[in-house]
Amino acid sequence: MSQVKCIYSFDEEEQYLKIDFLSKDESKAWKAFVFDENWTEFVSPACSISNPMADVLVYAYENLGLRGRIAVLCGLDSTDKAASAVETSLFHLQALLYSSAILVLEGWGFFEDFGFKKAVMSNGNTLFFLASEDLGQESCRFL
């Protein structure tokens, strides 16, 4: 993936940031949603997007102890270009936004190649996560 267009939009009412990632020809698209404890609590804004997203954030907060600015990646596919999409996403979420944790709703084994850990939620869904606590709080640890 050579060029990606990224559109940042902040939902004033619900207090979350949405990033739309679009390939140059717009044949590939995915999203990231960023939630921050300093903006508002996580559950209400996540519920306004989807119940599964709210479930993932509650699980990450209560069971994994993740805090701070948490990003959730959505809409990634398992094609050969997915690794490039993950790299682009990590750059935006970590280097530009300093996310303390990144969660992925879709589960494919290649996330583990990027350092993501796997957790199985109580509903049986698999969650991949990458957290700053695992890597010593370094500001650009995912790159």
Image (spheres, helix red, strand yellow):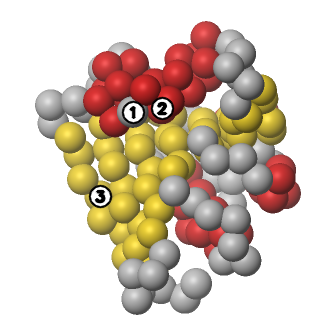
Among all residues in the image, which is located at the extreme top?
62
Identify the residue at the far front of this view: 123
Crowding around mark 3 (Cα neighbors within 10 Å: few <14, some 14 to 19, many 20+) is few
Residue drawn at 55 percent across, 88 percent down = 2
**Residue 125: in sight, yes or no?**
yes
Residue type, label 1 = Ser
Q: Amino acid at mark 3?
A: Tyr
The image quarter in which residue 59 lies: top right
Q: Count residues near mark 1 (Cα–Cα under 10 Å), then give few for <14, some for 14-19, many for 20+.
A: few
| Residues tagged 2 and 1 counted as in contact (Cβ below 8 A) | yes
Label 1 SS: loop
Q: Nearer the viewer, residue 79 or 20?
A: 79
Residue 68 image point, x, y percent = 50, 26
- Give how far across and how far down residue 131 sits, in percent: 68, 35
Label whose residue precedes the other's in the sequence (3 or 2): 3
Nearest to viewer (mark 3 / mark 1): 1
Tell me the residue that label 2 is attached to.
Answer: 53
Does residue 93 lie above or below 128 as drawn?
A: below
- Element type at mark 2: helix
- SS class, disc 3: strand
Measured in 3D between alpha carbons, the distance from the residue under mark 2 to the one under mark 1, in whole angstroms, is 5 Å
Q: Position of residue 118 (x, y in %)?
A: 80, 36
Q: Earlier in the sequence, mark 3 or mark 1?
A: 3
Horizontal relation, residue 56 to residue 46: left or right: right
Q: Mark 3 or 2, which is nearer the eye? A: 2
Pointer 2 local density, CA inside 10 Å: few below 14, some 14–19, many at least 20: many
Direction from residue 18 to residue 109 in the image, left or right: right
| Residue matched to label 1 | 50
* Disc marking residue 99: none
Q: Quadrant of the N terminus?
A: bottom right
How many marks on residues?
3
Residue named by callout 3 = 8
